[in-house]
Amino acid sequence: MNKNRISEILDGIDEKYIDEAADYAGQDIKPAFLNGIKWRSLAACMVLIIAVSLTGIVFVTEAKEYKAAIAFFDENGLSADGLSRSDIKEVYRDISTQRFTYDKTADVIKNVVSGIEIQQDEPTPEELKTAWNRNVWLNNNSKLKTGVNYRIEYKRNDDNEDILEKSIVECYKDGRILWKTDVPNYFVSDCTATSIGTAAWGYDEEHFFLIYWIALFNDKGEKLWECWLDYYDFKHEEIAAVLDNNDGTLAVIGRGNFDYLYLSKFDADGNEIYFKKTYIGETGVWRAARFGDGYLVQLTRLMIGENARLARLDSDGNIIDNFAYEGDDCSYYLADMAEYAGQIYISAYAVPKKGALIGHGEIEKVLDDYVFTKKNGDIPAEELTPAVRDNYTAVLLVCDPNSGNPKAFYSVEGSLGGGLKVNESNQLEWDVESIVSTFSSPATNSFSIGGTCQVYRYTFNTSGTLLKQIKTGETTGFRR
Amino acid sequence: MGNSQDAEECVNDAFLGVWNSVPPQNPEPLSSYVCRIVRNLAIKKYRANTALKRNSFYDVALDEIENCFQSVITVEDEINANEAADAINCFLEGLDSKSRIMFIRRYWYSDSVEDIAKAFGTSRHNVSVRLSRIRKKLKKYLIEKEVLL
């Protein structure tokens, strides 16, 4: 159907629904446990852009391929500036099939692959393939697996949509697979090794509202038990973490009914032996770790730029303290959390504080001070990248064992904090994503900056000594 | 809009539009009245500015919901806009408020999935899945109400 027609239809939506959603962005909910904290509301940004209309019987299929191409561009930090719809699809096919023969692929790759040396006349497909694989494609797929992992396999249905075929939970040691088990009906969100087995959790997508699921597997990958979390009138939305209580029970922490933090405990047979919910308002529950007899939980309210709030829970799930980690002139974003050697480490990154949040708070200073003020147009990567690097500092925090208050332990400029993991040698591995290339594209979205990061891995022992720092060869996309 | 100047101009024109129309108009609620003016101005501005360029972000939003209006027989004039809008309003009435707000923010305000996830304090994937379920339910509803054939 013509997009103008759709716009006409959407224009007929009742005022009361428009108003309800407009007010939502500015709701000022202040749970009792957060007294003293000022919440700011945001003005809704209401710009609707309608593309050139599309016609044709093959539109539905073509639209799906176009969507896949756009997702590929976004994931890999590619700019679609100046490309037609068919160009975008052609470049997508060209790169994903590793052919590199389409005439516009080279220009697209140049913006995302730093240091690439492409001749002014046409590069060969081999040159492009080598540059792309070295910097982006294969590096993202070359991570050596250790411990427990999971992956998702998809299949196409009759409507040509990708749907779940199965999830797979695997256990590795020294790079060799110990066991593998299929989970045919659920999307696995994550898994972790515990003292009573490997816990995996995810959701069942067949229902209108997701039904959350947990299972425990033994050291052969055999399922010991599974259970579903939704019951009565409490809708479990997400599971933030499954933690080993080291007493034969597991703790499950997450959010439910949009407004509640919950703690459930399960015994080794899969019986839920404890449940408590606590009202926290419209706050995200993202990560959790064991802290003493209780837990440390990351809470987020991203619309007001709050990502680094931590709540201490006692063993019963009662909130006994909460604090936001921030500096005088910088804000922190927490990326991962891990318990190691009796302490909690938090991977984070710091960005400069600025004024009113515009929804792209991390790069606010770069946008205001540089993109809009000085250039307000196409900016060469050679100028933009240093400005973006100046904006970020990766920080490894360690929490005080008594209060839980984090303090800076290690920092790396020009980078973002990445994942934290305890390796098979009982060393803490901290991944740091160093920003190596960036681009902005005012014609597509003047408030976004994309690019690429190279991943470095810092390894620490139980004394906190840095043992080694390596360049992993992996890359991640950067998009804010 | 693609740049801050056009966005500012759009907002200024909207305020002028409100100033000129109130009174005799007495819109209630005022916020959604202003939203509609801004939206319509932005659409006109975009059409004037961007014949060739595209904003993939918003294309995808309309691409997503377009499938709700696809049917076996797809002839534009067969779907009456008012009839479809009435059906959508009835459908929205039956949703819980959170799902309804997600739908409106995605397809009327054209918020990104990321921004909606931030507003709800949840993951991008959760929002994508919920919106997918809402779209499927909407399409089924439109067929049942014979808005689609």
Image (spheres, coloured by chain):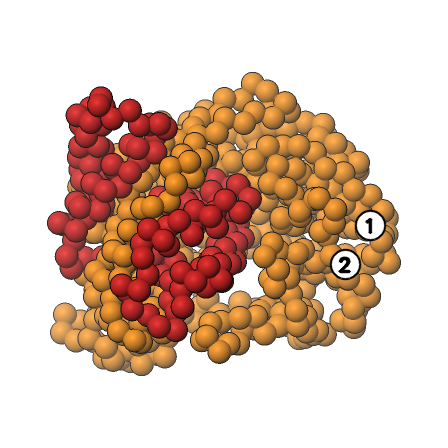
Chain colours: A orange, B red
Where is residue A174? Give x, y as percent. Answer: 67, 70
Vertical order, B52 against A99 (above or below): above
**Contact, mark 2 vs mark 1 (Cβ under 8 Å):** yes
Query: In this orientation, which residue lies closer to the viewer: A3 or A65?
Result: A3
For disc 1, the neighbor class at 10 Å (few under 14, some 14 to 19, many from 20) is: some
Find residue A408 and report its image quarter. top right
Tell me the amino acid under the disc marked 2. Answer: Cys
Per the model, the C-alpha gap separating discs 2 and 1 is 9 Å
From where the camera sits, is residue A401 visible? no
What residue lies at 42% left-to-right and 51% top-to-bottom?
A: B88
Which residue is under mark 2? A227
From where the camera sits, is residue A4 visible? yes
Vertical order, A133 against A201 (above or below): below
What residue lies at 33% left-to-right and 70% top-to-bottom?
A: B74
State which tag comes first along the sequence, 2 or 1.
Answer: 2
Which residue is under mark 1? A272
Q: Is residue A286 left or right of residue A441?
A: right
